[in-house]
Image (tube, rainbow, N blue to C red):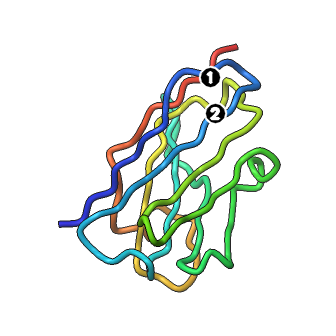
């Protein structure tokens, strides 16, 4: 049984920071691409960031590159999303994803494993 469990979401004021964590269990995830998507109310789910198993290749949504960082700790089977200078438009449910792949994909259909999501709310 594969499980992805997100943590670290919550309520933060605009300009603040949050770090999301996603712990994986049930399988060796060191060879998996790991990433994050988000879905705001009334909007489609969108790609946020992803990182290859080695950590050498990372890709973030263009509009988030200046504020968000993705990293991983394979020893802990955990991926992180550091979010700085948060804006109200970052308010969304953030989903952790994983898939056995050698390259990063930005479409949700490419990811087999999904967490339940964690709510991030940024107040103005």
- Where is the N terminus found, in terms of image quarters? bottom left
Residue 78: image x %, image y %?
A: 45, 60
Label number found at residue 85: none
Task: Look at mark 1 in the image and give the residue it sits on.
Answer: 122
In the image: residue 117, left or right of residue 42: left
Residue 84: image x %, image y %?
A: 73, 38
Q: Which image quarter: residue 32? A: bottom left
- Classify mark 1: helix, strand or loop: strand
Res. 118 in view:
yes
Viewer-side residue, 62 vs 55: 55
The residues tagged by marks 2 and 1 sit, at their Cα atoms, a distance apart of: 7 Å
Res. 109 in view:
no
* Pointer 2 with pointer 1, Cβ within 8 A: yes
Q: Residue reaching furthest front?
A: 75
Label number found at residue 90: 2
Q: Residue reaching furthest bottom?
A: 102
Residue 9: image x %, image y %?
A: 49, 33
In the image: residue 117, left or right of residue 21: left
Q: Residue at x 54, y 21 (%)?
A: 11
Does 49 appear above or below 11? Answer: below
Does 13 appear above or below 94? Answer: above
- Classify mark 2: helix, strand or loop: helix
């Amino acid at each position: 049984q594969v499980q992805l469990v997100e943590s670290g979401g919550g309520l933060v004021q605009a300009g603040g920071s949050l770090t999301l964590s996603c712990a994986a269990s049930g399988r060796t995830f060191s060879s998996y691409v790991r990433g994050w998507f988000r879905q705001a109310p009334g909007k489609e789910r969108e790609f946020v960031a992803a990182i290859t198993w080695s950590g050498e290749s990372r890709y973030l949504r263009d509009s988030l590159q200046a504020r968000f960082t993705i990293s991983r700790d394979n020893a802990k089977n955990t991926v992180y999303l550091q979010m700085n200078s948060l804006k109200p438009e970052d308010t969304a449910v953030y989903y952790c994803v994983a898939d056995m792949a050698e390259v990063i994909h930005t479409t949700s259909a490419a990811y087999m494993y999904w967490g339940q999501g964690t709510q991030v709310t940024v107040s103005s």
